[in-house]
Image (spheres, rainbow, N blue to C red):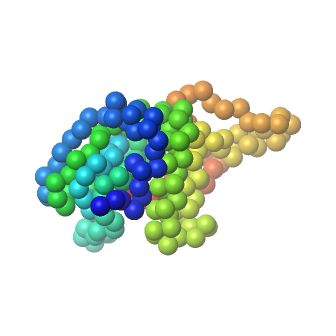
Amino acid sequence: MRGVDGFWFRLGPAERAMIERNAARRGYRPGEFLCRQGDTSRHVLVMRSGNVRVLAATPDGREVVIAVRTTGDIVGELAALDRGPRWATLQALDEVEVLSLSGARFATRCQTQPRLAWALLGVVAGRVRETGCGPSSAAARRCGGWLHCCCNWPCCTERRRVRESGSSRPRRSRNSLPPRRCRGNPMSARCGNRGNGA
């Protein structure tokens, strides 16, 4: 079964080869947890087979299923991009095989390989639609944070500095990752609103 997000299927041969070279192949039995809500792990998982459910805790302590991910989907990308704790729990529904990639390496590759970043952006857009959110919603604003983190787009502070200086284009940072927070940017990558990718 092909995943709704289809991250793997959005990639070209070069991007797939890069992930396979840099990732470790891991397997999970039915009922095993790939990660738990609140974990500080950073690895990104690309599903090669099987199905996992995405669980989130409610204020009264219950766990609810908010999504199911399957072959070709990417999970765990949020913690890699914004360096926050896992926001959801991932549990295998059957035999699952994933490619596990370092979060730091994945974030860096997104900045140097446009097709990889574009594939991830397509996933993010699809998940915003999946939640039924409009362009002014918290989830949509979260997309701006992902764009800033993935593609190193200038934040509002940088744009303001460019306008005031009269420069025609903003300076792009050469650092591998953007700052943890842009205080003036409501779309900061550290915004507390998250999508459904753990």
In the shown orientation, is residue 180 left or right of residue 99?
Answer: right
The quadrant of the image that shows the N terminus is bottom left
In the shown orientation, is residue 81 left or right of residue 99?
Answer: right
The one of 125 and 83 positioned closer to us in this rendering? 125
Residue 128 seen anywhere in this rendered image of the structure: yes
The one of 152 and 120 positioned closer to us in this rendering? 120
Task: Residue at 25% x, 59% y: name it.
Answer: 51
Task: Residue at 33% x, 40% y: name it.
Answer: 43
Tell which residue pokes out farthest to the right in this image.
166
Residue 51 vs 116, above or below: the answer is below
Residue 35 seen anywhere in this rendered image of the structure: no
In the shown orientation, is residue 15 left or right of residue 28?
Answer: right
- Residue 121 in picture, x, y percent from top left: 52, 51
Q: Quadrant of residue 166?
A: top right
Tally of marks = 0
- Residue 96 in picture, x, y percent from top left: 20, 52
In the shown orientation, is residue 153 left or right of residue 7?
Answer: right
Task: Residue at 73% x, 43% y: name it.
Answer: 159
- Residue 27 in picture, x, y percent from top left: 18, 45
Residue 45 vs 23, above or below: the answer is below
Residue 167 vs 56, above or below: the answer is above
Residue 17 vs 2, above or below: the answer is above
Tell which residue pokes out farthest to the front in this image.
13
Task: Residue at 59% x, 53% y: name it.
Answer: 144
Q: Quadrant of residue 58?
A: bottom left
Tell which residue pokes out farthest to the top in this image.
174
- Residue 40 in picture, x, y percent from top left: 31, 43
